[in-house]
């Protein structure tokens, strides 16, 4: 009886607490999009939603779309979700990722690990076209394709080597090689790239990936096909100029150039040289693909993960002269613009550093010098978009979000306000009146909040976490914080919305084929479609 | 100083004044030392070179869908520098136990950083409170390559920025693709000098790149500013060599 009372009290407390979140519409002008995560393109016209039949009825792990009924065809699952997102949730764009070598049922490249080639039968392209038709027919017009170049589980040609060569002498020899990445990653260490935390990794890893890399031409072929299909009139043959707008190509999810300079090979690959010795111009070539298909080349981009602090509204300057909360964006802009990347050297003499983690102040990498940072061979005009992934929250000493209810909506809001305002300051430095005044592209860039948590509590009410693990106060706090920030009200030069919120609403069942791994969030945690309101109500 | 820089600076000062600054005894992260002497190949000491030291951090195996690598318990990042004294001696104090890599930056530009041109100096298994003497670290001498860039129309940006290049990227590339930028040593309104120490008798490409200006060599031939590699070797014993290029106009 006593336990029942406690359970009831807990339920009432948290139920009421959730009801107390203040939800505001996103300040005008702001658009809304959604993340659909990995699309099982190979299985897009599968007549059922079952990956394997025996357990599919009762276990969402065995469904392609975890939140969709087992008997519903895959395509119908997506059609229903897309239609609802457009008509009920005011969603104007979708981001989706796709495996390259069979990972999560997407195989634009066959023969990975052997003799790779791009979609020889056209089957993958045909199904992708169906998916694009469904996006178009829903009324949604904007897409952000994201190739999974590190791969999902299930990619053909994946190789695990232990011990592998260690050309940088950084004591990393248990490595995995993904066929669409030009360098190895550390096996069982969070998928961190080789040379993590070593600024010279971009240079000293001269081995790159000679084991199974499919070659840039194959990767370009797959990306080019995505752009071609998005552009083609066959999406709706009777309508002139019918196409989807490629709003962004997210070439790599959550770049970390501060800790892993080797990621810069997705911009300029120095392990693949032409006959004259010049490095592969990856960003330039993907931009050319965009231009050739009639899209804006400055929308080829790399998303970043924004850091937070364990001190309310704490701010400090980074080595770049920007706020440290935007450090990953400074690093990306530095890589593209011809500046410096990598970790700054801490001020000398070394400051006390009692907290495990990077040499930080309140978890932010403040100041330092650029002595050991490196630069790439080329520079580019900056993109006209920045894509930031974050769920603004106050961190604990270990760098994790403080849990709800300690993490109040107000606490999350204060952090969000600080971070969003810091981004506004960052972008303004590139404007004619800013101290850099050297990039009209970034001055006028679209701010894409490319991933942000949505209010969808996990099944366990005592954890008070949303499906992605963030405290349940964060989504409403993020919106409120944005509305209170200087970024609110941003417009592009043509007067359209300068900010887009793109909540993470991953509907898939799993990322790996059975046997089912332990994954988080639980498959089926999100709805398909996921209800976005009242947390996310855009005002275009 | 701009408004933004001012604001950041003020924030730094305010935060420094208002933060509860723990005492050293409370926050000491370790008491190990790495000591040694920087020397040329003939044993003569290197004066005022900078030792950059980095601790190799251990991480936990992949857990669930963590969005960042998770450090093993009590792991500490260390990425700092000390300057060697007039005798080439250096002493890195206050280190936690662990594995370290050392690089050396010679401000005079004569000696080659082992991290760039060979292998970092590895200091493995430093234990708590240990004083590890790595003895003499011998650095190879290189030749200094100077690239003088004439800029008669002042087309290169005067702004030193870590994000956007000034209009030209200058460096050397190896046959294997390693690339090191030359350091800007002097800057005037109508020209600037870049320098880099390079190893002897190694095929290297002088890399010049610009997306905003056209560049010509000493005799006026246009260089492909979208990425030009001119292969050369610095012969043993040549102390310095200068290459002059000119900015001839906007692209």
Image (tube, rainbow, N blue to C red):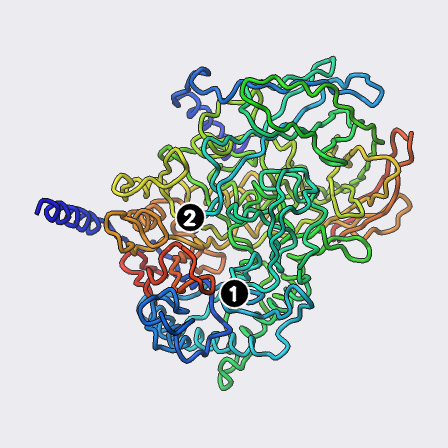
> How many numbered discs?
2
Question: Which of marks 1 and 2 precedes in the sequence?
Answer: 1
- Give residue A233's mark: none
Secondary structure of the residue carrying tag 1 is strand
Determine the residue located farthest toward the top in the rendered image: B87
User: Label 2 to label 1, Cα distance in Å?
Assistant: 22 Å
Residue at left offset 80%, top offset 32%: B197
Q: Is disc 1 surrounded by few (<14), some (14 to 19) or many (20+) residues within 10 Å?
A: many
Relative horizontal placement of residue A66, taking residue A213 as reference (left or right) = left
Secondary structure of the residue carrying tag 2 is loop
The quadrant holding residue B137 is: top right
Pointer 2 residue: A390
The quadrant holding residue B114 is: top right
Residue at left offset 40%, top offset 64%: A508
In the displayed structure, A123 sits above or below A66; it is below
Relative horizontal placement of residue B141, taking residue B14 as reference (left or right) = right
Q: Position of residue A203 (x, y in %)?
A: 70, 43
Q: Position of residue A302 (x, y in %)?
A: 55, 53
- Give residue A98's mark: 1
Relative horizontal placement of residue B87, taking residue A177 as reference (left or right) = right
């Amino acid at each position: 009886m006593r336990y029942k009372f406690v359970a009831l009290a807990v339920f009432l407390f948290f139920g009421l607490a959730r009801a107390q979140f203040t939800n505001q519409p996103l300040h005008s002008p702001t658009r809304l999009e959604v993340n659909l995560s990995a699309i099982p393109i190979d299985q897009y016209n599968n007549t059922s939603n079952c990956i394997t039949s025996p357990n599919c009825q009762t276990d969402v792990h065995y469904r392609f779309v975890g939140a969709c009924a087992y008997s519903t065809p895959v395509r119908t699952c997506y059609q229903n979700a897309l239609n609802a997102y457009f008509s009920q949730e005011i969603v104007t764009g979708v981001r989706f990722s796709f495996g390259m070598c069979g990972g999560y049922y997407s195989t634009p490249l066959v023969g990975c690990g052997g003799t790779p080639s791009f979609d020889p039968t056209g089957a993958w392209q045909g199904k992708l076209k169906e998916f694009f038709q469904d996006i178009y027919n829903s009324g949604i017009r904007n897409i952000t394709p994201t190739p999974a170049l590190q791969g999902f589980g299930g990619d053909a040609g994946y190789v695990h080597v232990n011990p592998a060569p260690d050309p940088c002498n950084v004591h990393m020899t248990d490595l995995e090689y993904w066929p669409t990445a030009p360098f190895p990653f550390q096996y069982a260490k969070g998928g961190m790239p080789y040379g993590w935390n070593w600024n010279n990794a971009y240079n000293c890893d001269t081995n790159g990936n000679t084991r199974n890399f499919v070659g840039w031409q194959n990767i370009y072929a797959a990306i080019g096909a995505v752009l071609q299909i998005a552009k083609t009139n066959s999406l709706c043959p009777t309508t002139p100029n019918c196409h989807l707008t490629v709003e962004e190509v997210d070439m790599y999810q959550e770049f970390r150039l501060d800790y892993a300079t080797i990621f810069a090979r997705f911009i300029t690959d120095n392990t693949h040289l032409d006959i004259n010795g010049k490095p592969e111009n990856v960003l330039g070539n993907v931009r050319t693909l965009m231009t050739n298909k009639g899209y804006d080349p400055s929308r080829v981009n790399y998303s970043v993960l924004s850091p937070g602090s364990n001190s309310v509204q704490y701010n400090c300057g980074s080595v770049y002269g920007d706020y440290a909360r935007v450090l990953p964006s400074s690093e990306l802009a530095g890589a593209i613009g011809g500046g410096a990347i990598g970790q700054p050297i801490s001020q000398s003499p070394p400051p006390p550093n009692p907290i495990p983690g990077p040499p930080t102040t309140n978890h932010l990498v403040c100041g330092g010098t650029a002595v050991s940072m490196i630069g790439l061979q080329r520079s580019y005009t900056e993109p006209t978009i920045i894509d930031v992934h974050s769920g603004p929250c106050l961190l604990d000493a270990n760098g994790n979000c403080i849990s709800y209810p300690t993490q109040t909506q107000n606490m999350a809001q204060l952090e969000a306000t600080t971070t969003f305002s810091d981004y506004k300051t960052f972008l303004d430095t590139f404007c004619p009146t800013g101290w850099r005044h050297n990039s009209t592209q970034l001055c006028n860039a679209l701010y894409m909040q490319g991933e942000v948590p949505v209010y969808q509590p996990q099944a366990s009410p005592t954890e008070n976490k949303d499906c992605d693990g963030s405290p349940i106060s964060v989504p409403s706090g993020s919106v409120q914080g944005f509305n209170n920030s200087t970024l609110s009200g941003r417009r592009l030069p043509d007067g359209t919305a300068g900010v887009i919120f793109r909540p993470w609403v991953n509907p898939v069942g799993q990322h790996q084929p059975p046997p089912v791994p332990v994954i988080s969030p639980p498959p089926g945690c999100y709805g398909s479609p996921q209800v976005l309101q009242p947390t996310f109500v855009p005002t275009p | 100083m701009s408004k933004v820089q001012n604001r950041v600076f003020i924030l730094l000062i305010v935060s420094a004044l208002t933060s509860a600054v723990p005492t050293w005894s409370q926050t000491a992260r370790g008491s190990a030392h790495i000591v040694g002497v920087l020397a040329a190949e003939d044993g003569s000491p290197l004066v005022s070179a900078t030792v950059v030291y980095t601790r190799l951090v251990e991480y936990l195996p992949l857990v669930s869908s963590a969005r960042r690598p998770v450090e093993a318990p009590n792991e500490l990042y260390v990425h700092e520098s000390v300057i060697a004294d007039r005798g080439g001696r250096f002493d890195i104090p206050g280190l936690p136990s662990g594995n370290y890599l050392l690089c050396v930056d010679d401000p005079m530009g004569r000696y080659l950083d082992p991290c760039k041109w060979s292998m970092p100096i590895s200091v493995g298994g430093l234990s708590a409170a240990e004083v590890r003497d790595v003895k003499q670290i011998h650095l190879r001498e290189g030749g200094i390559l100077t690239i003088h860039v004439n800029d008669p129309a002042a087309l290169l940006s005067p702004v030193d920025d870590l994000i956007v290049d000034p209009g030209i990227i200058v460096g050397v590339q190896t046959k294997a693709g390693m690339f090191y930028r030359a350091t800007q040593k002097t800057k005037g309104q109508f020209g600037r000098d870049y320098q880099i120490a390079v190893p002897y008798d190694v095929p290297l490409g002088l890399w010049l790149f610009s997306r905003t200006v056209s560049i010509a060599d000493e005799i006026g031939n246009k260089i492909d500013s979208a990425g030009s590699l001119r292969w050369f070797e610095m012969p043993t014993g040549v102390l310095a060599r200068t290459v002059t290029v000119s900015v001839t106009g906007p692209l």
